């Protein structure tokens, strides 16, 4: 921690900060500059929060942290990449994975048709909501346990492991019984009791980035799960809220590249929520893989026009199959090395 | 709902939309414009979500909702303002209330000293965290039930009713035993299982706005609680996340004025989290009341420099007392009616 | 500047940074911590930009600036507040000022009626656009020089000095001939050639904050004008762009409190653009003064429904007069000191 | 335009709106719903702004536009894609282009070394700033006309056409003399006098998206240039401002996919400004092309550590050459079609 004193700070104020740094178990290094004095607090006593309160001490201008707040998720300490195994499907390895399925499980028929279609097109995991977080209390809230049973059943029939959201600590047991991977929705990214409970779950966790979470906050949310004992976490970028309202969210692909630099955990991308607009999902799926994503999560519905939720951003089976075929095609021809001659 | 067709939409596509609107139980009104056709879906069949999926039907450009999605919280149906009673203290009435206390309960001594100080200065409710949502798993997480007992004890001694945060459905019972009002933290604003559980609680609820929640999403979160049976909800603006990083959050006072226009529920302001900077809290407290807030929630600690959390934004007791005295003082003298004469 | 080395930085990399710091004319102070080494660059050689490029040197993690980049506008060096005189009307003094008038000058009659109305209600300066920055090329772009003549004429007749926007370096001369204060619109806040030209103008400048400008960037824009020779700058907060779309902008009143702390220049508020919604303008006007603003800028039109621009956010003359009367009224009664007794 | 009346609107208020719509030259279509009345204004009288002021008429709740505000840039009216020719280099054709060079022209040697390096690696256009928009007045502001001469000279020697920024209407002539393409910087995207002047220039224009501009505002800025007579506009996404501060900007690749859907103009991407971080530029360059970009603009400096501006985000020549080689490599192996068998 660097303590930046005000230009007008007195010697007494400087000494007070130095003593307080020592009290918290750190060493104090003083740099006296032309305009102001700067004091470095060095050490690792684990009393960082107390140190932070120094910002209100007289004569202090601002505090500047110098180390990353996350540890277990950091690549600084764990260089090799983590591969998370979801019932036999590796996430984070050489190949990218595609998780596909409907926003909500609506019926056995709907899910089975979708699962067969996405499997045949190349998906390796099935998604489908049983408990749905909905902005309005009047919207469809999911079929609950019935949906879990359908998911399990369809998984057995198609061979696709299942990812589904868990919204509450109380549901972790029952969802773990039926699902292969537990999803934390974007709005629950900082639901700390839920994160602590998932740290004790026996299933890998898919942790979506909150719509206003910085990359650091996202990694710290993952740190809760690792610190509590569950090392199998996959991160998922799904768009952030910005002033741009033409698309549902701003899909932050650079956050994927940055997260891959900072953490050893796998990172996947959800272009369905990330954009909310069917027409741009193919382009953004390819862009996400190019940005370094370890996989994609895509909403697919046999008839988006009749979906009970997220119809606008769902692909139908034909569009999904077309997208899968396009994933390999180069985006565009190489740039021309023959430059124009000068005029 | 208005369905805006693409300029190139065919007659067949228009007819398909009309039929689908009827299937969902609405009436269809067609307006054929110079450039494009617009179709209004009129009615109240409650199948809005299904209607929304029409955005993916061929020939449809965009859907435009025309009614507010919230009902019970709306002033359209409930003109008179709601006054929420918290153990005898009314919120939303003629006078504004001040809720004050430390970020976290650290000890009986700390809380008692703070409670006496803020009461004597004019606060009518005591705040203090027992369960703390913290971005990092390595930060102080609160004293839990021990803190709840201290809160109750200090409440009895000082006569100040107590507001404290509940983070999980599992804790609602125990927190209700000790506290007079249950706070939903900003990061839990869309924790829907928690909202549904609080709808059944016997305590009034203080609902903080999420850091990236629109005013509509905030009101819909309140709608969950009212729709489930608890009419005693107080909203609290506490700052939103924007590109401006000089302050911890952007304190959105116009959201208070807007919320007061849209809902009959009381709305208070938290300038401590809203700004994160002690020096601007007095100005922003006065501004919040001027903007129409029904009260303030302010973090106070006997020694902010030694606080275990949120020291940087906590006032000490003297600063809080000074703020309370300043609340009455007019901000600035009236503008001069004597204008300059022309040159 | 603090140079934060990576944990794995080698001694050679550390020495390279130290040498480079010295080459740029600064002194290097090294702090060797448990996890990483931190190097302070102390001095004032004015080659900060070159120093900043060190972030790409091998072994460097991040650079942390420790001093504010602005100088002439800073209160650190100029404690007493600046009062800007606009043709006899002081801005930044004990009383707050109200600048009012239409978005655009549409005709002599329209402006004269507005000017008389706002003057009688208490405004001391007249606003009105001659050159209008419009998002679409197909919208009304202002009457240009004709509007300037009308402004001057109405100013003579009513005694109200005139503020109007200048959009281009080429127009500074002609606008200066007719207007008493030159406004820089939000979208031109970082139009540096314009700022440099206004530094040589003989009129005070009203500098609106850009819709995505941080407070620091805003102050640096003012620094351009002061550094070039014109000390008469008034800052104006007019709302920033955020994810909240219910209002036209997010009106950032804490930025006013913060700016007043950082600079000696006067700061006023524009609740018309800041919110874009007539109904909340009175509340936000009072809140802005409570937040510390030195004045208000408000759009008024004799018939907002027929305004050629910004009708939705314009007050009519009766509403403006009512607002002026309300400015003095206390926002709400004092909080109740009699707290509820314990249950 | 759809006029959404308040639920409590009276018949008289409805009639007033209908009449006013007719006065503005539109037809009025009334839909009377269960809760409220909605009135469609149909036609193309070009008096949209006047219509918009109806939002303040009594009984009106909100106005909803139903057609896009841009025309000449729209794909609705101009389906085939525009290819912009820059001194023989086509932008928007089958191949993507790479524009590379230093942030600022610092000397003939620096530019020539860079130009040769980027040309040999595959770039087809040279960038380099002569007039630099800088947040602080104390930062390096560019070499001005001297830089223009160097750019021309190096262009002749290397055969690479030149792109450089023009900041002021007054500089359009001189920059046009030396440069092959005129760049509008992000902060000038809504500098309307500059846009109007460029509409009369004889050079193609590279229009950067403003840091807080929506896609619609960006397209409307291009509309200014096309409407004024210059059809040769290339759009450039370069990152927007959001709450995420770990990277310099949030690089909005979905905006590229969306812009390509809405307009026929070419769209390129600037990952250097879009991220501000060297390490993620390769990944984001590939992602941008995958998202549909017609080209890239990349900052390259022979020695980023000694650059006078933007060193932190500049690639050196070796890194640029490596990036160019990587552009062709598939991002990652295809997903595995062999799914895991059920447990």
Image (tube, coloured by chain):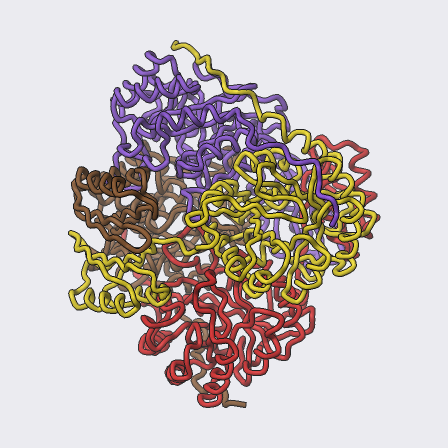
Chain colours: A red, B yellow, C purple, D brown
Q: Which percent across, then down, holds residue D312?
A: 53, 50
Q: Which percent across, then down, holds residue A123?
A: 43, 80
Q: From the viewer's perspective, tell me whether residue C314 is left or right of residue C327.
A: left
Q: From the viewer's perspective, tell me whether residue A309 is left or right of residue B319.
A: left
Would you identify the image quadrant in which residue C310 lies? top left
Would you identify the image quadrant in which residue B166 lies? bottom right
- Locate the C terminus of chain D by quadrant: bottom right
Foreground pick, A154 / A37: A154
Q: Mark yes or no: residue D201 visible.
A: no
Q: Which percent across, then down, holds residue B276?
A: 63, 44
Residue under the point 57% across and 52% down: B233
C157 over C241 or under it: above or below: above
Would you identify the image quadrant in which residue C182 lies? top left
Q: From the viewer's perspective, tell me whether residue D291 is left or right of residue B235.
A: left
Residue under the point 59% across and 76% down: A204
Q: Mark yes or no: residue D90 visible.
A: yes
Foreground pick, A337 / C306: C306
């Amino acid at each position: 921690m660097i303590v930046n004193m005000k230009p007008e700070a007195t010697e007494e104020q400087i000494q007070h900060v130095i003593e307080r740094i020592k009290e918290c178990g750190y060493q104090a290094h003083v740099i006296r500059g032309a305009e102001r004095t700067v004091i470095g607090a060095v050490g690792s006593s684990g009393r960082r929060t107390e140190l932070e309160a120094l910002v209100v001490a007289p004569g202090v201008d601002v505090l500047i942290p110098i180390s990353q707040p996350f540890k277990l998720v950091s690549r600084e300490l764990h260089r090799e990449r983590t591969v998370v195994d979801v019932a036999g499907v590796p996430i984070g390895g050489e190949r990218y994975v595609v998780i596909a399925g409907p926003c909500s499980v609506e019926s056995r028929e709907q899910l089975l048709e979708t699962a067969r279609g996405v499997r045949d097109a190349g998906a390796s995991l099935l998604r489908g909501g049983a408990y749905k977080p909905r902005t309005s209390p009047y919207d469809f809230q999911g079929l609950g346990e019935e949906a879990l049973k359908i998911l399990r059943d369809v998984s057995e029939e198609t061979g696709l492991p299942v990812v589904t959201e868990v919204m509450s600590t109380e549901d972790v047991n029952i969802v773990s019984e039926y699902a292969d991977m537990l999803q934390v929705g974007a709005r629950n990214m900082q639901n700390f009791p839920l994160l602590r409970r998932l740290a004790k779950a026996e299933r890998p966790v898919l942790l979506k980035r909150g719509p206003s979470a910085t990359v650091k906050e996202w990694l710290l949310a993952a740190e809760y799960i690792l610190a509590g004992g569950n090392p199998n976490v996959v991160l998922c970028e799904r768009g952030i809220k910005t002033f741009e309202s033409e698309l549902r969210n701003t899909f932050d692909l650079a956050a994927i590249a940055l997260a891959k630099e900072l953490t050893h955990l796998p990172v996947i991308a959800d272009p369905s929520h990330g954009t909310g607009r069917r027409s741009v999902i193919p382009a953004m799926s390819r862009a996400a893989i190019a940005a370094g994503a370890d996989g994609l999560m895509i909403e697919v519905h046999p008839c988006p026009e009749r979906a009970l939720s997220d119809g606008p951003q769902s692909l139908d089976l034909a569009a999904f199959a077309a997208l899968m075929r396009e994933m390999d095609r180069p985006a565009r021809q190489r740039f021309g090395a023959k430059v124009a001659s000068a005029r």
